Image: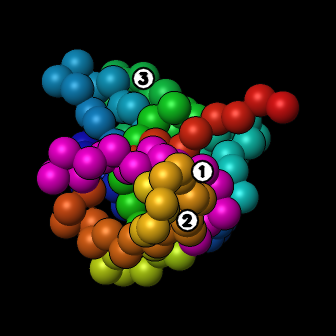
Amino acid sequence: MRDEVVELLDQALAENPSLFLINLEITADNQIRVVLDGDNGVKVEDCISISRAVEHNLDEELDFSIDVMSCGATEPLMMTRQYVKNIGRTVVVNTNKGEKIEATLTAANDENITLNWKAREPKPVGKGKVTVQKEAVIPYSEITQTKVMIKFN
């Protein structure tokens, strides 16, 4: 069943290339759970069309249920494509060195991301602090989790 579902998902996603698969789970009792994201977000209509593409083409003899949903706004980023989609947004990145950096995601490629932020540091000479612009290039291999910060104005 899994191969058939994967093939149907691939076909449905090929018809809407701005959408991409984040996760597919199929339980022992044939509950199918599909999590999607999209370069321009995911609409309810997108979930419905993907669900129908799988549901209407699976073997009618199978007893199954299907849930298709978009990944939540509070979910960690999992794929390079999600990082690219969120360039310009504020993120919190946890690294395997124990660092937690809140910064603007300014670039993302297949190997790493670039973050920019302002920090207050002691003046090189004299008392007091000065605001400095910081930048870090972090390889994906050093990232344990990245979440987009939701800001309400």
Which labelled disc corresponds to residue 134? none
Nearer to us of marks 1 and 3 is: 1
* Separation of residues labelled 1 and 3 (CA atoms): 37 Å
Instruction: Tell me if residue 32 can be seen.
Output: yes
Please say if 22 is above or below 68.
below
> The N terminus is located in which quarter?
top left
Q: Amino acid at mark 1?
A: Thr
> What residue is pinned by disc 2?
132
Q: Amino acid at mark 2?
A: Val
Q: Identify which residue is drawn at 55% across, 65% down.
A: 132
* Separation of residues labelled 1 and 2 (CA atoms): 18 Å
Seen from the viewer's position, the closer of residues 113 and 117 is: 117
Nearer to us of marks 1 and 2 is: 2
Check whether the beta carbons of the residues at disc 1 and disc 2 lie within 8 A of each other.
no
Q: Quick one: which residue is furthest to the front in this view?
A: 126
Image position, residue 43 (x, y; %): 74, 42
Characterize the local packing of mark 2: few (<14), some (14-19) or many (20 or more) Cα atoms within 10 angstroms. Answer: few
Please say if 98 is above or below 9.
above
> What residue is pinned by disc 1?
90
Q: Amino acid at mark 3?
A: Ser
* Separation of residues labelled 2 and 3 (CA atoms): 54 Å
Sequence order check, earlier mark of 1 and 3: 3
Q: Identify which residue is drawn at 60% across, 50% down.
A: 90
Nearer to us of marks 2 and 3 is: 2
> What residue is pinned by disc 3?
65
Magenta segment boundaries in residue numbering:
85-106
Characterize the local packing of mark 3: few (<14), some (14-19) or many (20 or more) Cα atoms within 10 angstroms. Answer: few
